[in-house]
Image (cartoon, coloured by chain):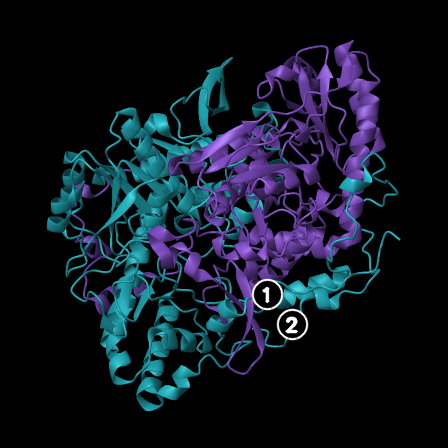
Amino acid sequence: MPFIPHTEEDTRAMLDAIGAESIDDLFDEIPAKLRAQSLDRIPMGRNEMAVSRLLHERAADDSQPLSFLGAGAYEHHIPAAVWELTTRGEFYTAYTPYQAEASQGTLQLLYEFQTMMAELTAMDISNASLYDGASALAEAVLMAVRANRKSKSRRILMPATVHPTYRKVVDTIVRHQGIQLEIVDFDMHGGHVDPDNLPAEPGDITAMIIPQPNFFGALEDVHALTDWAQSNSALVIGVVNPTAMALITPPGEWGNGNGADIVCGEGQPLGVPLSSGGPYFGFMCCAKKHVRQMPGRIIGRTTDLEGKTGYVLTLQAREQHIRRSKATSNICTNQGLLTTAATIYLSLVGPEGLRQTAAHSHSNTQQLMEKLCAIDGVEKCFDRPSFHEAALRLAKPVDEVLSALDAEGILGGYDLSTDYPQLGNAMLVCATETKTEADLEHYAAALQKVLA
Amino acid sequence: MNNTHTPLIFEHSRPGRVNTTHTQRSTATAHSIPGSLLRKTPPCLPEVSEMDAVRHYTRLSQKNFSIDTHFYPLGSCTMKHNPRACNSLAMLPGFLRRHPLSSEQHGQGYLSCLWDLQEILKDVTGMSAVSLTPMAGAQGEFAGVAMIRAYHDANQNSERTEILVPDAAHGTNPATATMCGYTTREIPTDGNGDVDVEALRAVVGPQTAGIMLTNPSTLGVFDRRIKDIAEIVHDAGGLLYYDGANLNAILGKVKPGDMGFDVIHMNLHKTFSTPHGGGGPGAGPIGVSKRLQPFMPIPVVGKKNAADKEVYYWLTEKDLPQSIGRLSAFMGNAGVLLRAYVYALLLGREGMTRVADYATLNANYLMARLSQAGFDMALPQRRATHEFILTLKRQAREQGVTAMDFAKRLLDYGFHAPTTYFPLIVPECLLIEPTESESKETLDAFVEAMAAIQQEAEGDAATLKGAPYTMPLRRLDDVKAARELDLRYKTKPVSDING
């Protein structure tokens, strides 16, 4: 039987020990009329060979065009060792490290992960991950409401330059707790939030979200925004791309004061395959003073009976299994396997490798923009500096252009016209370090043909 | 187990040790970014060779118990075998490299798998529709209670502000109710482990939004009066939420839809054997009855006929305008869903019921053997489902040893400990879930270990108090960890690699 080791003899002996006639007798406490009649929509079991054939056929249906799509999920090279190690059974098939003495592998790795994320963001502390970037932002908003005790308004400023789906997810998750999400509009020339357009006396604000880079790939004026928010007693929540952290000012150093209060983001670029959107992992870091408001698992270093160094789950009094209805979040699962991949990824690429990945992605996108903007009917949407993604305006409707490019085997980018109709025929393009000079030329030639 | 001291990866680091093979060697600079937005000092990430990293993480992996290495009877977590085909097939390049926003036409293979999985989960739970998007059990719970709220709001029933939760419930249940803006009222459990129906009857009313139930409950027994409970809550205008954490016990035997539930979440990382990965990822799809269908979280996979061909596509805000909305940046934990799908295909229709059969056989056998060995069960008069509770209250009183001591000592005998101190209503308890994938020999060995530990408790309780002895470390100081917070290594500055 698939994955069941019992021989007939075993089953007989076990039933005898229980004092039951048949396995069916073991279900005698379930009222008879509740017993399931049939499962006719479920196919009969197949062996590994047959299932393997089916899945290979289906995977082959998912063709792999040359992709210039980003919009929150980024194609980066993943060193072979990352998933070789991550899928070792001892990582892959362990559970949450409740028994610390038998889980030092996972616990030490997560402590290393927390250190790396705190380093990348220049923040004091990191947790052991959340589900993904979007849900991490929702948790960050809830955390800010708990942490900013002086503020009574529960008003959160949400720039329109935050990923549109992140904004939707935050709304889904926080809407039942009397939190107001106020959209802050962006500057049409820069594609960023202009600090000069923020009100001098905004009233009571609980927190302001600052994306860096923002959804358009543009770099926000993070210092001015942070200073403005904090001078109005609002906490600052940074949403950042972790690869970009190797190149640009980390949130711990934003503004003239102490930097951002809470930082979160999507961890996928750090060694996690695109995989149709998941599993990825969300990360969250914060200033030390807010640690008791942090959701999710946190690992701490301690000692054992003999004084040797070891690692445990700590600050569990925040969590649902202890605090129940008063917990900081209902979260229980984290994304342990993906943080394992990210920790190994960051160890393999190191500070210089991550900087090169970031710099090369930045420069590839700059070059792509130059090549594409040289084509008639293509122009840059915004003049702000960008990281590894940028917005273009086309002379034709974006959906038509994208399907024509698709026919050429190219995923041309992300159509912005649904989420941002005010931008006209705009789309977002991204060229990471995985793209060669020839790829960029190929794209430019195809776009020229499509627009001709 | 690898018991040697393993320094942190940062302690292997040497300034200037660079792996040139893993990144695009580049002279590119960030000339277009103004200096005020550039990072001044590089992050202190480790600078190690590939071999350093491989050796370090291999050694760390050897400091873990896992299903692959040890019996792991962690109650309520369903630590069953994770078939390797599920992993290798979910990691086929076509699936792995697909960008989540690439068009549906480039994802027909993947979408067809998810469609099939939706159909399988609908059938096995008896629900009308399934959304695969929640990324873990607790997010599925959130989606479920948010749908209950959306339903009441749509019916102008905003005076329903209370969610009922049995006192044996998982901690995520009351925490979820709070996130959805509800207050929680606890319902006691009767002496037989069933929900106290009279107590329930006394508290339902126009303020009742719904009830969150796990059946079999966290006490490891099937609530025999589930139909009465459903009727009482429905008559009061409330809805029923099914916490699917224990679905392994009834897979193919009872459908939650037939018990009267309006919404359920499933933990695919439990029942459908996707890996637990040291704490995640999970996947927590939800199933709904007809009346909650309009409120499902998006996206959901749809199927239509176009040009004599079946085409799979995403249902979004446009198709489900009353949806509670989105829960993830993209479409949920796709890779986990593919693993569950492969598992479901390998099991097939007949394999589903076999899971419940043998999970139940193993739990009842282990309970019988441990009773014969002199241990006390919390509910000896009841059938075990896929798990059961043993209480060490007597040992605590007579020998001064606790459930924690037994748990730590089991590690020395080569077994991961069962869940301890949950559910909260049973003192000094071990919640034991063997799962269907363990053999009789393993269960027998576990009974022998428990009996040997009991002997130790009677002879020399101090031995137990000091356990474990054979792990990489002795018992760890949780109190110190929480008092003297040390949550990261204090890295030293690395050399200025750009200079």
Marks 1 and 2 close (CB-CB < 8 Å) = yes
Residue B226 visible somewhere in the drawing: yes
Chain ID at mark 1: A
Given residues A346 and A161, the one toward you in this image is A161
Residue at x-position 38% and y-position 41%: B142
Q: Is residue B242 above or below residue B46?
A: above
**In this picture, residue A277 sits left or right of residue B148:** right
Q: Is residue B290 above or below residue B496?
A: above
| Amino acid type of the residue that numbered disc 2 sits on in the rendered structure | Thr
Chain ID at mark 2: B
Q: What element does badge 1 sit on?
A: helix
Residue at x-position 38% and y-position 30%: B296
Q: What element does badge 2 sit on?
A: loop
Residue B331 visible somewhere in the drawing: no
Where is residue B425? Give x, y as percent. Answer: 25, 63
Which mark, by number, is residue B6?
2
Q: How many marks?
A: 2
> According to the colouring, which chain is cyan?
B
Given residues B374 and A263, the one toward you in this image is A263
Q: Is residue A239 above or below residue A447?
A: below
Residue corresponding to mark 1 = A108
> According to the colouring, which chain is purple?
A
